[in-house]
Each structure stands twice: as C-alpha cells, then as structure tokens.
Image (cartoon, coloured by chain):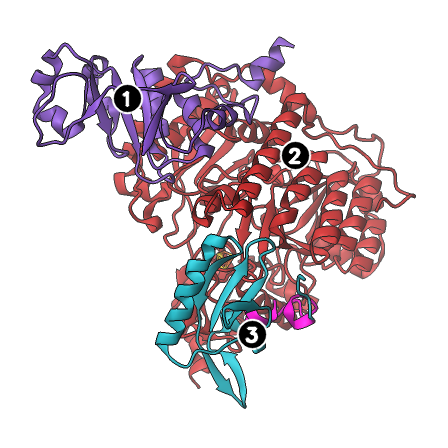
Amino acid sequence: MTKLIKSGAYAQDVYAPVADDAALPDGPVLVSLARFHKDRDTLLARNTPVGIRLQSSENPEQLGQDVHHFALIALEFPKFRDGRAFSWARILRTRLGFTGEIRAVGDFLYDQVNYQHRVGFDAWEVPDNFTIEMFNRALTEMTNVYQPSADGKKTIRELRAAR
Amino acid sequence: MLTANRLRDGDVLYRKGSGWVLMLADADVYPDQASADAALAAATAETVRNEIIAPYLFEVREVNGKIVPVKEREIIRAAGPTVHPHTGKQAGQINA
Amino acid sequence: MLNTLVKQVDPNMYRYDEFDAQFVGERVEQFAGQVARRLSGELTEDQFKPLRLMNGLYLQLHAYMLRVAVPYGTLSSKQMRKLAHIARTYDKDFGHFTTRTNLQFNWIKLVDVPAILRELADVEMHCIQTSGNCVRNVTADQFAGATDEEIEDPRPLAEIIRQWSSLHPEFVFLARKFKIAVGACEKDRAALLYHDMAVQIVKNAQGRIGYKVMAGGGMGRTPYIAHVMSEFVEREDILAYLEAVLRVYNQDSRRDNIHKQRIKILINAIGPEEMRKRVAREFDEIKRAGTLQLPQDELDRITAYFAPPKFETGLSDEMPEAGTDFANWVKTNVSKHRAPGYAIATITLKTPGQVPGDATSAQMDIIADLMDQFSVGEVRVTHEQNLVLPHVRKKDLPAIYAKLKELDFAAPNAGLITDIIACPGLDYCDLANARSIPIAQTIAKKFENLDRQHQIGELKIKISGCINACGHHHAGHIGILGVDKKGVEFYQLVLGGSGAEDASIGEIMGPGFGEHEIADAVERVVNVYIAQRKDGERFLDTYRRLGMAPFKDAAYEKAAA
Ligand code: SF4
C-alpha cells in the first residue's frame, strides 16, 4: 500500500487512476499520455481536475500549452536510478511555469526526496512505512545548497554575499 | 566453491557448511552443480540477515592434491594482491 | 606525524568557509546515517550501492575501497599528512594515486567509513561524488598557477564547478558517470579531449577571456575524442552552459543499455551539430532565468584564494650543478616556472619496480615535509599518477632531489617509457580481466637503463586491466589492455593513442600476448621505432607516419616463433 504526502502531511489522493482502455469515471482522474492523446478534447472539456502520469521517457514539454490544464502531473521513477524526472520537474516549474501538483511516483528512495523537493516536486506517493518524521528529516539533512533550483532556496553564494 | 564478502568490513569469505570461513583451504568444495546451486541459493537467501553480501560461485580444480581456483581472479582474491605480498590473506592479515 | 623541524605552511588554495564546512559536515553525517541504515538492514545492498558509490565507496576484489577526492589535484601538506594518518590507522599503511587525481585506500572497513570521513572533513576533504552516476571530481592541469603557458589559473573555475556540481539536485542520478576537466593553455596536460566535458580557458579575438567547451570525449568500451560545443562562452555564463549540457544529457541519454549511456554515445548518435542545437536552446532558457549567472565578484573572491605565492625576486635563474644523476633528473622532471629562479618539479611515483601511483604513509609524510620546506606547502596530483611540487626555488632542487632519492621517488623518468600509467587491475579491482601493475613493473624493469630511456625519448605507456580503461590505454602511445581468455590473463597492444592536445585514439594491433610475452612484444615495437625514426620524431610521430604494419609484423614475429 502507498500513501500520499503533500504539504508536509499525509493527504487524501482524490485522483482515480484510469487504465487506457477503461471508461472515464466521474471526478478527478489520472490518465497516461497515450490516453490523453486519444481523448484530449473530452478530458479538457471536463470540469473536474485532470491529472497526467508521465513515464520517465516522456518529456512534459510535448504537452505544450495543454500543460496548464492539468491540476496534477505525476512523474514516474521506473527504478530509482533513472533520474530523468529530476529534469522534467525542473523544466515544468522553471520553463513551463507549471503551478499545479508535481507528484513523485514509482521506485524512489528516502535519500532522493530532498533532491525531488528541490527540483519542484511537491507531492510524494510513498510506502506505508514512510513517516512524516522521515519526510521532514529528509528535507533537513542538508541545510544549505550550492545551486539555484526550482525551490527558490537561497544558494550558498547568495548567503555569502549577504554576510 | 562459494564466496562472498562480509558486510561490515568487506572481508572475503568462503562457504563451509551453513557458515563462512576466511580461508579458501578451509571451505567446502561442491562436487556437482546441483549442490553448488543449492549452497548459492541458501547464501542468497541469507543476505537478508545483512551479514554477508555479493555471494557467487566459482570453479576450482585439484593441482598436486591441492584445491586451486581455475581463474586467476579467484586465485588472487583468495591470497591477496600479487604486487603487495605483505598484505591480504597470503600474509595472514584477516579481520577478526 | 609532523616532523618537528618542519613548520607547516598553508598554501594559497581554496579554504572552506563556514558554509562549505557545514555542507561537508552534514554530508558526512548523512552518509553515516546511510551506513547505519545499511548495517541495520533498513537499506538493501541494491539500494545502498548507488548511495555508497556516490560517496566513493566500492566493494573490490578483497575489501571495500574508499576513493578520496583531490579536487583539481591540489593538496596541502596538512591534507597529505592526514592521508598518511588514515593509511596508517585504517588501512595497510599505503594509498594509491589514480588517473583521476584522487587517492584510493584499498582496505577500508565499512564500519570505519564515518570516522574516516570525519577525519577528512577536519582537513577540508571529502569523498563526495568520487564515484556513481553523477558529476565526478573535477580535474585540472597540474601546472596550474605555476606555468607561464596558461592564460590564467584554471583552478578557480574548477572550484566553482566543484561547488556547483556538489549534490546538484538535478544531476545526481544521471545515466552514467560524468567527468569534467579544466585547462588553460594550448598544451593539454589534463587529457581534456577524453572527458565527458572539458573547459579550456581561452581569449577571443577582442582579447576577452572566456571558455571553450568540449563534450563527448571518453575512454572505456567505445572511445571518442570530445567535440567542441562552443568556441567561446562568456565568463558569467559558464555555469549556465555546463548546466545546459548536463540537462540535455540527463533528458536524452539512453537508459536501456549500460554500455550506451555515456554522453559520448548520445553526441555521436545524434551528431555534434544536433547536440549543439539542443544545448544552445537549453542555454538560452537557463540564461533567461538568470539565476545561474556567475557574478564577477564571486569569481574574484574564489580567485583570490589561489593568488600566486609571493615569489622571491633577485634569485639566480641558473640551474645549480649537483652531479650527473641530478642533471638527468632535471632533464625530465623539472619544468619551466613562470617566475625567474623558480621551477616546477615532478615527482614520479614510478621508480622501476614500484607500483605506479602507490605511496606509503611514511613516504606521504616526508613528501608533506618537502612541500612545507620547499614548495609553500603545496603539491599536485597528476592524471599520470605522479606528484608535482609547483613552486620550488631552483637553488633548492638539489636538496629536494637528495630527499627524493632517500624516498625512492627520484626516478628521472617523467614522460619516458618507464613513467607508466597502470590501473589497479586484477590485483585489486573487482571488474578486472587481468593484472596491470605487474606488467608495468616488468616493462619498467626491462627499460630501466637510463641511457636507453633517453635514447627512446618521450613514450607514454598506459595499461588498463579491462575495457573500462581507467589506465587510459586508448590514449597511450603504446596502450596495453588486459583481457581474459578462459580465466587466463592476456594483453592486447594498442598503438598510436594520445591524451594530449594532439589527442588520438589508439588502434588495436590484433590478438593478445601472454603475461610473459607482452613486455618482449613492447620491446620489439620500440625497436622498430628506433630503427625507423627520423630526426626529432617521437614514437608517436613515427607511428603516425608509418602506420601499424611494421610494428605489427615485429610484435608478432617472435611471438609466433
Ligand atoms: S580499467 Fe578495469 S581493471 Fe582497471 S581499474 Fe578500471 S575497472 Fe578496474
């Protein structure tokens, strides 16, 4: 079983994952890119939130302006060693200006949560034994950072300049 | 024969019975593939205890009544670096 | 052990401020936590492996190996003494300098690693990203700041890259490892063109200093020479440009075949032109965001740490006389310095019979003393597994030479046939097919005669124990690659490679030679060169003129008989 962490707390997952060949239920849905391509007009016409789940090989840029219709973009880690989604999240936030939820799903480690947070993820689908305490610890193991990223955190260079 | 490394210090281990020894000469030789595979399966199952890592089988042969690995790699692993004969198992250096 | 007669000197190099110190300290505790979670079983070996690799910890043939970063090859005497102390306390009294200018300890216990990392942090050192699929330790020209050939010292930029790449959230789970090198002159001592990415400091037509960026070089299974990505990147844009290259790599690299996941494969699959286009697009975007701009005051601040030492003036620029042995050593191991009366001294860790790159803790301690006494407390590690005293007074050279002789590190062979690069090979490495070190030792012994070495002249032999090419065999004038034939070691000859500014990839001669044949085959190849060379030709030049055939004929002639 998995749980959802959002805004530093467990949250209810309101999205219903929909298989590519299943009928669309009422309420918020989570679809694949293939399904979105197939039923784009129907999906965009709905007045409930739509989420899309992208595989690690699917560049979110190909969504174009449609990206802003999504309330949720779930980025998949097929195995934790596949780090492409770190770039996808960063592009979504910094380049495409996406302000909805970016959710980490799939196989990732405690040790990656902080990096995910830095590049723009703000929701995590975690195993049941992943506690809020662990989540908070993951984000605070390293106090300062050298690189600007999507989290807007002040870099060590900026902190130095402000001394 | 079956070898692995000890998790906490990395020392090379060899399988004897259902346990491990430090020297190849003290370890079990499996007469056939089936018994070797069974030993490997048991050792692999054991890795969840977090005492040993990376178990695998290697081939040995008998030379003048002594058991020696077939591959140079395993000969060196069992003894220590050939370029530093004062280090490794060949020099009696083992972690307790 | 600090020799009481020697006062410790703090060289002009980067010093951690409170932010760097906190960063490394927290990283150590983070890793200590990961070790604890592994020992308790919370992490499986599968999960722990990439985490330990990201901190330089391997499981090798005999034990764990810990790789300590020596950023851009610069070490202080204090750091050298700490490395000696770690070798003595936690290892078997020696360490190994690598072709990535790092230092490896071969016999480390997992349970000791947190304590070792804390000791390293005390002297501003770490193991961050010395392995794993991330940006590795940045290397640089070992003569940086000392040679008059350079446009400026490349190390400030290397330090800026080190900081930017440390735990970069987007790039710590790349498809494969990513190695960056920095140089600042036409002469390439850092094998720039064999790196995933390389930056060369250049001047443009207007005389402005900026950076030429190359990418897609690499050794390994499929060697490539790097392509130019941009001839000139403005100073303030360099991090934005590097980030653009890395982002394109992270997005577009294959992830389905471990042998095809380096950036060199991507660039050669889509073509350098397309790569440049993709990078340019990212670069524009990153520049527009504006957060990665490198302000001049930050560059100045970092550059100030590397200010040249106060060179004495009025020193004689004459080379002192101290006998034939000394003169021979000067011939190969001493290079021109930017300041009159000064010199750059290369200490080859290659006395014939030695393990290339190895140093005992006692030798490290004495080198630290030499650094303090004669070289403003500083030493450089080279990718050729040697050490360099960057700023020595010429008049001190005889004393330095005498001390090196006591250490058995006075071989007058820098750049000669016995100055061999060899990876750890099957004596230590879990991935090896064959041993490298004993082959290096045998060849060095064979060519020990100094007159003969000088007669042969510049000849770089580089030996790798497997296709991963840590011993740079593709870039050797004579490269040797260890292969495994049914559990027995064999060695292929590779001729005509170069890792310098005239970079080329060596060509494989043919079937391998046995462990006891390879040194003789090398000798026959060298004899062809001696017989056929024209005036002033190096081995490499003769090979390039003649091609493989005559060398091949000679190499196999006796082997077949
Ligand atoms: S080249 Fe191969 S044998 Fe040598 S150190 Fe690298 S991986 Fe090991």
Q: Is there any visible trace of residue C191 in the rendered image?
A: no
The kind of residue on which mark 2 rests is Asp
Asked if the magenta segment contains residue C244, the reply would be no
Q: Mark 1 highlights which residue?
A: A13
The residue sitting at 40% across, 37% down in the picture is C174
Q: Position of residue C363 (x, y in %)?
A: 77, 54
Give the crowd class for mark 1: few <14, some 14-19, many >=20 residues within 10 Å.
few
Q: Mark 2 highlights which residue?
A: C148
Residue C439 falls left or right of residue C277 = right
The residue sitting at 24% across, 29% down in the picture is A54
Chain shaded cyan: B
The kind of residue on which mark 1 rests is Asp
Q: Mark 3 highlights which residue?
A: B24
Q: Position of residue C267 (x, y in %)?
A: 32, 39
Q: What span is colored magenta in the figure?
A: B76-91
The hue of chain C in the figure is red
